[in-house]
Amino acid sequence: MSLPAYPQPRHIAGAAGPPGPDYDADVIILALDRAEDTVAAIASARAQVGIDRHVWVADQGSRPENLALLAAAVEGAGDATLVQLDRNWGVAGGRNRATALGMGRCIFALDNDAEFAGPDTLAQAVRALEAEPDLAAIACRILIFSSGADDLSSWGYPPGLLPRSAECFDAVTFVGAGHAIRRSDFEAAGGYDDALFFCWEEFDFALRAINMGRRIRYRGDIAVRHKVSGERRFAWNGTRWYHFVRNRIYIGLKYGAGLPSLLPRFFAYQVKGAINGVLSQGLRAGPAALQLARAFRPTPEEAPLYRLSQAARNYLAKNDTAHRGGLPRRVRAELLAALPKAAAR
């Protein structure tokens, strides 16, 4: 597989292109307002040392005054570029288009409300990928910017592994706020699925990478600090829950799960949505997931990536299911986690 040939976005400021055909890493930052945080993220990326890298900022519709602030942050820079995409493609589509601009061997995605924990964080991530050739991606530890504590809203792994947040372990996904991907694996797996727009896009990519015989490695010693900005975020009473449910059911269908096997998960999501006052979002997500699945037509070349091999199933069982337990236990945990939120409301 390979990435599509995307239209060239409008160049706003900074370098006209990458530094050359062979360098260590591209740092990609998606922008949609949040100008102050994004400028800080750009500065953090440009301050990374001990590595050849280029910073790409892809704007997806910021207000003119905010776009001007971003342009000022990279004006005249030889190591950074600001472009504006033709529309808001979401996280999945935006990352695809930003990634396609570069040629670095590693792609580090940094949220625009996050910063590298230290000046050599990027170099650490690249060295980690180079040290283990079968790794497709490095998942960083995500810390709360203000306190340095673990950002529990960005913990995408089994709850039982949280006490090991400072350690390293194989995983079945990674968190978008800060992660590194080997470019050759990103391209071989076909990048992200634009249709997801937002939510679960990392898991969807990881499944294909795992099916290619690659690993995902959580590194608690490589961190980014996350501000968890509220501006322009999907609120749970907006569309976030809709995307969460729709995309997770769609991914199940993509990888061959039958509707009967997905119904317990779907019903559990409806109960959780009802408890938290967003039942209508979850109900709308079901038909939308079916519509996406019907429209999904992998080519013969792509189709094998969506049929999980026994080796991939064993990897998922060892590194995720074994830590979570069976479906009844997971459903119970989801519902119990929702109850305090309902009580608070």
Image (spheres, rainbow, N blue to C red):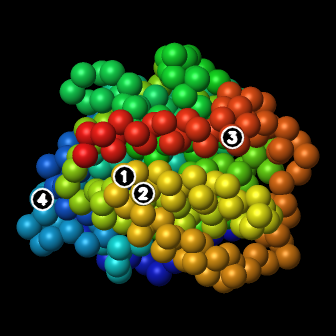
Give the mark nearest the N terminus, 4 or 1: 4
Give the mark nearest the N terminus, 1 or 3: 1
Q: Is residue 27 left or right of residue 187?
A: left
Q: In this view, does 266 lie to the left or right of 1?
A: left
Q: Name the residue under label 3.
A: 328
Q: Residue 274 carries which label?
A: 2
Residue 81 seen = no
Q: Nearer the viewer, residue 163 or 143?
A: 163
- What secondary structure is found at the residue carrying circle 3? helix
Residue 152 lies, in percent from the top left, at 40, 32
Q: Mark 4 points at which residue?
A: 69
Image quarter of residue 130: top right
Q: Residues within 10 Å of mark 4 (few under 14, many from 20)?
A: some
Rounded to the nearest angstrom, the CA distance separating label 4 from label 1 is 37 Å
Mark 2: amino acid: Ala
Residue at the spot 70% in from the left edge and 60% down from the top edge: 262
Give the mark nearest the N terminus, 2 or 3: 2
Q: Is residue 276 left or right of residue 304?
A: left
Residue 288 lies, in percent from the top left, at 55, 77
Q: Which of 112 and 121 is in front in this view?
A: 112
Q: Name the residue under label 1.
A: 276
Asked if labels 2 and 1 touch by Cβ distance under 8 angstroms, the answer is yes
Mark 3: amino acid: Pro
Image quarter of residue 321: top right
Give the mark nearest the N terminus, 4 or 2: 4
- What secondary structure is found at the residue carrying circle 1? loop
Q: How crowded is mark 1: few (under 14 residues within 10 Å), some or many (20 or more)?
A: many
